[in-house]
Image: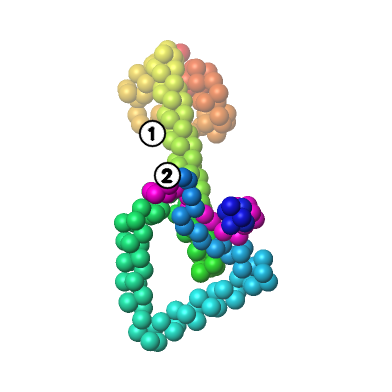
Amino acid sequence: DSALEALSVMEQLGYVIVSRDKDTDTGQNKPLRIWLTDKFFTSRGIRVEEIRQWLGQFKAWAVKNGLTESLRRKYEQHLLRIERIGISIKDKHSLRNRLKQIKRWVVSPDLTAEKQAKVSLLEGELENLRRKNDERLDELLDDTDNNLRSLAKAKARRQNPHYQAWVHWSNMAMRHQVIALEQALSREQPGLITAEPETYYRLLLERAGAL
C-alpha cells in the first residue's frame, strides 16, 4: 500500500506515467507498466540537454560497436513478450500518443520547430489558394455583371424606336457618312450614348435628316 501511495503521488507530480489493468491472478486493477517522464529527471536538477547528450552518446556507442541491429531486435522481442503476457499498450492510443510526444520532445527538439514551420507553410499555401479563389470569384462576378449590363443595354437599344430607325438608315446610307455622324456626336457629347441612348440616336437621325 505504501508503494502504491508513493507511486500515486509521483504520478500526480508528473514524474511517472502508469498503465493500469486487471491483474490476471487477483482480478484487481493494478499498475502493470511504469515510464519515467522527463520531469522526473529535471526535478532532480538534471537538464533536458544532459538527457539528450546521454541518449546521443548511447546511440553513438551502439553504432560504433555494431549493436544497432541487435538492440533493435531485442526491443522487438521485448514488445512481443509483453504483448503475450497481456500488458501491451497497443490499443491504448492516447497513452501511446503521450509517450511519443515526450520522446519527440526529448530526443528531437528540432522537430517541434520543423513541424511548426511546415504548418506555417501549409497555412500560407492555403491562404494563397483562398485568396486566388476569391480573386477568381470576384473576376467571375465582375464579368457576369458586365455581361448582364451589356445584355440590358442591348435589350434597351432594341426596344428604342430611334435606335431601330438609325439602324435602318445606316443600312441604306454610305458607311463613311454613318461613321462621321457618330464620331462627331460622340466628340460633342461624350457619354451621351451610355447615359441617354434614346436622345443619342434621335440626334443622329436629326443630323442625318431622317427625322
Residue 99 image position (x, y, % from top left): 49, 58
Mark 2 belongs to which amino acid?
Gly
Tell me the residue that label 2 is attached to: 27
Residue 36 or residue 109, whichever sits in front: 36
> What kind of element bears circle 2?
loop
Magenta-tinted stretch: 7-27
- First of labels 2, 1 by sequence position: 2
Q: Is residue 166 visible?
A: no
Q: Residue at x 57, y 59 (%)?
A: 16
Q: Is residue 132 left or right of residue 90?
A: right
Above or below, comparing residue 50 to residue 30 in the picture = below
Residue 152 image position (x, y, % from top left): 44, 21
**What distance separates the C-alpha of mark 2 from that of mark 1?**
107 Å
Residue 199 image position (x, y, % from top left): 53, 18
Label 2: how many Cα within 10 Å (few below 14, some 14–19, many 20+): few
Residue 198 image position (x, y, % from top left): 50, 17
Find residue 176 and name its label: 1
Residue 128 or residue 85, whichever sits in front: 85
Q: Residue at x 38, y 87 (%)?
A: 65
Snapshot quadrant of residue 61: bottom left
> What kind of element bears circle 1?
helix
Q: Nearer the viewer, mark 2 or mark 1?
A: 2
Residue 210 on the magenta span = no
Q: Is residue 189 visible?
A: yes
